Amino acid sequence: MKPEQLKDYISMAAVVAAVVATSFSFLEFKGIGDSSTPILIALAASAYAAVFSVYVSRMRERRLRQRRVFIIYSSKDRKPAAEVVHYLRVNGYNPWFDVDEIAPGQKWEQSVMKGIGESAVALYLVSENMKSSNKFVSEELKTAMSIMRSKDESFSPVIPVRLDDAEVPQELADVHWVDLRSKDGLEQLEKGLNRVLGQA
């Protein structure tokens, strides 16, 4: 169990213990067998359920954020990007894919930057199409590299994923890439993601 999980369990247990102790102190004051006893027990159980529900919700949100994967790609590579996103979802990751995340009326640039800030790792889909992408794609890469941190310092928080023979950008030149054209490309990608996220 990780320290932050233990801390959450202790906090939850402390709140529940306080609620139960207060309820039973009140029962003692009122006398066991008082007609209010079932009501107070129900209140204590409700308080426990509420605290537990909040805890579970918070843990789920934290887990989703820890497995949030931002996808940087050229719009011309939407199909292979969507295939990567599908693979990630099926395998328990929480990909940030602009097609799914940006709603009509949202400010595009702000939404993208917020998505990067909420993600733990990024995939940079390397292809010839990136050469003709707008300058904002390179901004996405720079932002991701500046704010994301790998759990293992020997790993980059941005993983280059090759779709063709295009050159990997200079910023990622020293990072080992994954080639999706290889038979085990997606499995290798998942292996790298787990190491970056500290889950291997």
Image (cartoon, rainbow, N blue to C red):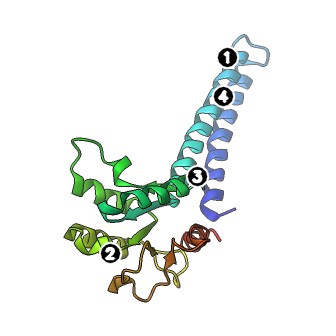
Q: Mark 4 or mark 1: which comes first in sequence?
A: 1
* Residue at image mark 1: 39
Q: Quadrant of residue 185?
A: bottom right
Q: Mark 3 or mark 1: which comes first in sequence?
A: 1
Mark 2–mark 1 distance (CA, rounded to whole Å): 68 Å
Mark 3–mark 2 distance (CA, rounded to whole Å): 28 Å
Residue 75 as seen in the image, left or right of residue 184: left
Work out which quarter of the rendered image holds the C terminus and state it.
bottom right
In the rendered image, the residue lying farthest to the bottom is: 174
* Residue at image mark 2: 128
Q: Residues within 10 Å of mark 4 (few under 14, many from 20)?
A: many
* Residue at image mark 4: 44
The amino acid sitting under disc 3 is: Val
Find residue 90 and name its label.
3
Mark 4–mark 3 distance (CA, rounded to whole Å): 39 Å
In the rendered image, the residue lying farthest to the top is: 35
Residue 29 vs residue 183, the one in the foreground = 183
Q: x%, y% of residue 106?
A: 23, 45
Q: Residues within 10 Å of mark 1 (few under 14, many from 20)?
A: few
Work out which quarter of the rendered image holds the N terminus and state it.
bottom right
Q: Which residue: 69% across, 35% down?
A: 21
Q: Which residue: 43% across, 69% down?
A: 123
Q: Which residue: 35% across, 71% down?
A: 144
Q: Nearer the viewer, mark 4 or mark 2?
A: 2
Asked which secondary structure carries label 1, the reply is: helix
Q: Are marks 2 and 1 in contact (CB under 8 Å)?
A: no
